[in-house]
């Protein structure tokens, strides 16, 4: 695998110029302490520095996998950044890459060139180009068992292709608006699609016909996630609500309200109990899917929250925003741990590498930034600080140029808890303090009089 400082697949891709001319090979910036200047990429990553890879084109989407992190660019290129900060060109579309999904050793990509491509990540080559859509592909997914690939397009259709026989394609035409998100159930029985027509449609994968139309949203369905246990589907909408649907009965299990603007991104914890959503209202909300209730609101972003990622063990949340800021939150204390303000334009993706060692963020400014986040060192550095009767977990060090958020009284912490009693500092109220002072003063006066 080639390093950024060497010609990258030049023989296979003649359009790639030499490293000195091609923007893809611009000198890597190392944003860290002066002591790290002059270190190569691998050394800077091991020291925890923030490494900025200038890819020469806006990054549209980002996905993490066992091979590293894959970036889809505005110029159609698809790049793999491995765990050693080496970059390899997987291949290209003719136009902007809009969506990607990885399953096993296969990558599916969808583009503004109206095509979707399937790639083998072991061999690093294209398997097939599938191009029946007549407009941009906005959503794509490979089924968990690897039997199907489905895509949604701005031509209002959903397409399903059999990965067992790429000649078998079905075009599902029932939506009356753009298809913005798609998913396939774990058992591969059903495909789901959310659309600008406000509906969530369920498709039988065996018969390739629509079985159910779920209505309830009053505006575009923007995002769709399935719970890992396979029991529910969750949709986020421009109507500012989140709806939870049963995948057994195909009925509404609950509706979650609280955001003041469009829901832009969502993810679900591995235990299927917590939902996390990001919104144009600049907040992140954590919801209980057991109680169908809001648990907490994380505030601190100055612009809309564009993307979310969670560390594999579920302790930390990473968020990106339109203003280029990336934040790290503790999901135990619900407080902000660190932030980075190095991107110049909107963050389009955040991810945690499979080895848990790095946080990666991508932006429309054409950069991918890699921050050392070694889990073993992090756990060793984790210490608990007592604030009143509440313990706050804080990292001793997240190295590089991430700004550490120092321990603060909970009253000024950047979150608001909905449950009564949560977030209580354990200290006295102002009235209680006043009464205490008066009692002390009275005791002093009595002691003077007795003398």
Image (tube, rainbow, N blue to C red):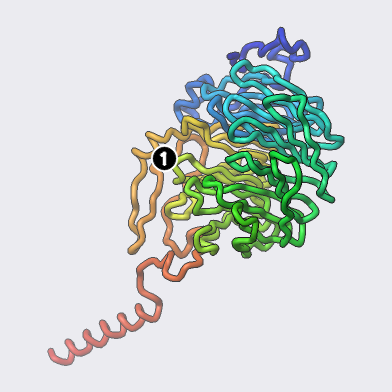
Which residue is painted at 74% across and 13% down in the image?
13
Q: Residue furthest front?
A: 207
In the image: residue 131, left or right of residue 58:
right
Q: Nearer the viewer, residue 139 or 75?
A: 139
Residue 436 in the image: state x and y as whole percent: 30, 80
Q: Give percent across and percent down for residue 426.
A: 35, 68
| Residue 396 in view, yes or no | yes
In this picture, residue 196 sits left or right of residue 50: right
Q: Residue at x 73, y 59 (%)?
A: 215
Residue 33 vs residue 125, the one in the foreground: 125
Q: In this picture, is 308 found above or below 65?
A: below
Residue depicted at x 48% and y 22%:
43
Residue 30: percent from the left, percent from the top?
56, 28
Residue 202, above or below 240: above
Label 1 Cα crowd, 10 Å radius (few <14 / some 14-19 / many 20+): some
Q: Is residue 395 left or right of residue 437?
A: right
Task: Report which quarter residue 281 is drawn in.
Answer: bottom right
| Label 1 SS | loop
Residue that label 1 marks: 397
Residue 266 percent across, percent down from the top left: 61, 49
């Amino acid at each position: 695998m080639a390093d950024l400082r060497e010609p990258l697949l030049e023989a296979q891709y003649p359009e790639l110029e030499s490293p000195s001319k091609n923007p893809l090979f611009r000198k890597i910036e190392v944003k860290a302490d002066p002591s790290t200047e002059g270190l190569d990429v691998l050394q800077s990553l091991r020291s925890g520095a923030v490494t900025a890879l200038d890819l020469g084109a806006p990054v549209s989407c980002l996905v993490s996998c066992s091979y590293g992190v894959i970036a889809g660019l505005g110029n159609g290129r698809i790049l793999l950044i491995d765990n050693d900060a080496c970059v390899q060109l997987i291949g290209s579309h003719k136009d902007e890459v809009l969506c990607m999904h990885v399953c096993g050793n296969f990558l599916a990509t969808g583009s503004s060139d109206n095509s979707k491509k399937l790639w083998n990540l072991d061999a690093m080559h294209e398997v097939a180009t599938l191009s029946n859509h007549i407009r941009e592909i906005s959503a794509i997914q490979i089924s968990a068992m690897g039997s199907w690939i489905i895509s949604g397009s701005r031509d209002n259709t959903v397409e399903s292709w059999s990965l067992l026989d790429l000649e078998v394609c079905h075009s599902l035409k029932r939506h009356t608006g753009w298809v913005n998100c798609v998913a396939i159930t774990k058992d591969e029985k059903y495909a789901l699609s959310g659309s600008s027509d406000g509906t969530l449609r369920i498709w039988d994968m065996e018969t390739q016909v629509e079985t159910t139309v779920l209505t309830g949203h009053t505006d575009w369905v923007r995002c769709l996630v399935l719970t890992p246990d396979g029991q529910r589907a969750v949709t986020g909408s421009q109507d500012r609500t989140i709806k939870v649907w049963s995948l057994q009965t195909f009925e509404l299990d609950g509706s979650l309200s609280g955001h003041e603007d469009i829901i832009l991104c969502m993810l679900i914890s591995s235990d299927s109990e917590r939902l996390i959503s990001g919104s144009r209202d600049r907040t992140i909300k954590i919801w209980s899917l057991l109680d169908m209730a809001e648990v907490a609101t994380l505030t601190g972003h100055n612009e809309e929250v564009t993307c979310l990622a969670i560390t594999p063990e579920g302790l930390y949340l990473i968020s990106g925003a339109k203003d280029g800021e990336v934040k790290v939150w503790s999901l135990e204390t619900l407080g902000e741990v660190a932030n980075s303000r190095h991107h110049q334009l909107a963050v389009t993706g955040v991810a945690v590498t499979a080895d848990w060692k790095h946080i990666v963020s991508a932006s429309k400014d054409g950069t991918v930034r890699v921050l050392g986040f070694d889990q073993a060192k992090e756990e060793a550095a984790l210490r608990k600080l007592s604030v009143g009767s509440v313990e706050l977990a804080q990292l001793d060090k997240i190295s590089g140029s991430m700004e550490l958020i120092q321990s603060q009284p909970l009253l000024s912490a950047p979150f608001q808890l909905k449950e009564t009693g949560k977030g209580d500092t354990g200290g006295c109220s102002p009235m209680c303090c006043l009464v205490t002072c008066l009692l002390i003063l009275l005791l002093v006066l009595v002691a003077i009089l007795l003398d």
